[in-house]
Structure formats: structure tokens, C-alpha cells
Image (cartoon, rainbow, N blue to C red):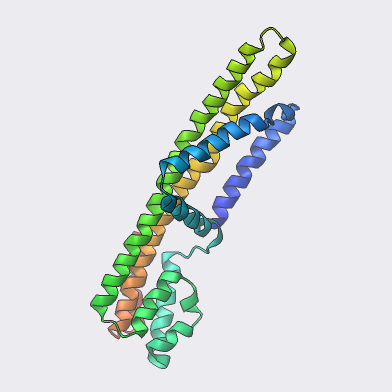
Amino acid sequence: MRFTTIFGLLLGFIIILTILFLSGSKEYFINITALLITVGGTLCATIIYYSPKALHITLIVLKKLFFSKQLYSNQFTEIIVNLARKSRKIGFVSLLKTNEARQDAFLYNALTLLADGYSAGEIREVLATKSVSDSDNFMIAERVLRTAGSLAPIFGMLGTVTGLIIMLGRITNPETIPSAMGIALVSTFYGLILSGLILKPLSGKIRDKNGFEVSNHTIITEGIILIRKGENSQIIRERLSSYNVSSL
């Protein structure tokens, strides 16, 4: 998921830049004023729209989207099965020192509860609360980026209107009209790229990742509870396999 996100963004920009270079008019698409109106306006409006906490959560989620390793449900099933086998040899407390424990923060929290002697019901309750909180953060970030994606074309249009007003003010001096026309046209171009290539796709990617995270949290929760109950690794694998199918 991290790879496809970065690859999609890079491919999109490469295609656009290639088209600009092949057209032989790339200098017409570079306008600092238009960029400031579109990007700056979108940023300021988003800051006004949402609380500092929501913006901070969005940055955290974006960091996780780009820099954290994505594990899928079948991988978590194997991790849980391995932990179940090891728990019979080294005990619950020592599971925190295994390589599997460092694969995921939610899994580490679950293993901490297991090591601290929480009952199966208590583990389910605590992890359910944590899972809901994480999912809420993803939904907040998704809304922030979706809103920003809706605002970007508006500020692109604002740049267009600004450029036209400047152009009308310089109608008696034809030599200055091209610079104003550049602001007018390029602002819309920037707004569409910001919305259609960056903000809205990222918002959709966050929504997609949230679905994966919820499925993974379910597998981790059920797996740790089965380990707590002392089930053998084969039964755990069979129980968790149904979640692998439902999360495809």
C-alpha cells in the first residue's frame, strides 16, 4: 500500500511533466503567484475549517500511510500462530521480546495486556476501544483531505478570477496582459492537480487503509484472546482463516 501510494503520485507527476516538456511550453505552466493563491488558499481554508487536533491527527495518519509497513490479514494470522507456539515454550511475558511483537503497535499493546494477566474479556474490551479510536483518527484524516480536495479547485478558480481582474486593469497596456493571463489559466490547472492527483486520492487511500486496519485489529484481538485461552496453534489458524477471507 505504501508502494502504490508513492508510485501513483510519482507516475502522475511524471506523466504531467512529460506532457509539458513535449508541448515545448513548460514555462507557461510555472507561475508562483498562481501557486500561492491555490496552494496557500487551500491550506489556509483547511486550517480555518478544522481544529489543530484534527490537523495534527491528519499529519500522523499521513506519516503512517507513507512510512509504515503495511501487513495484511494473512500475515497477521501467521504472526499470531507463531506467537501461540512460542507462548507454550517461553510464556506470555517473554512474547514482548520476540520479533513478532515489534511488527505492529496494536499487536504490541495486545501482547502487553496478555503479559500483564488481563482476562480474555478485559483484553477484548481494551483492544476494541483502541481499535475504534484508531479508526476514528483515520476517518478524521480522510475528511480533512477530502475537504481540502474540494477547496483546491475553488481557489484555483479564485486565481483565475484574480488574473482576469488584473488583466482588465491592464487593458490599456497590452504588454502586461500575458502575465495576468498566466495567473488566470495556471491557477485552475494547479487547483485541479492538487485536488485530483494529490488530496482526493490520498483521502481515498486513507479510507482504504482504515478498512485494512480494522480487519487486522480484529484478527489480532481474536488471536490474542485464543492464545490467552490456551488454544493450540492449529485451532487458532483455522479460526483466524475466516477473517482472512472476509477482509480480502
Instruction: Residue at the far bottom: name it.
Output: 89
Q: Is residue 207 visible?
A: no
Say which residue appears at 33% left-offset and 82% top-offset.
227
- Residue 224's place in the image compared with 184, above or below, is below
Q: Residue at x 74, y 26 (%)?
A: 25
Left or right: residue 176 compared with residue 128: right
Relative image position of residue 69 (x, y in whole percent): 53, 64
Q: In the image, is residue 198 above or below residue 122?
A: above
Residue 85, percent across and down? 40, 86
Front-lying residue, 12 or 58: 58
In this rendering, would 231 be left or right of 25? left
- The residue nearer to you, when weighing 140 against 131, is 140
In the image: residue 196, left or right of residue 168:
left
Q: Quadrant of residue 194?
A: top right
Question: Going by the image, does 88 lie left or right of 19?
Answer: left
Q: Residue furthest left?
A: 121
- Out of 192 and 209, give the one closest to the viewer: 192
Q: Position of residue 160 (x, y in %)?
A: 57, 22
Residue 84, can we see it?
Answer: yes
Residue drawn at (34%, 79%) of the image: 113
Looking at the image, which residue is at 42% across and 53% down?
A: 53
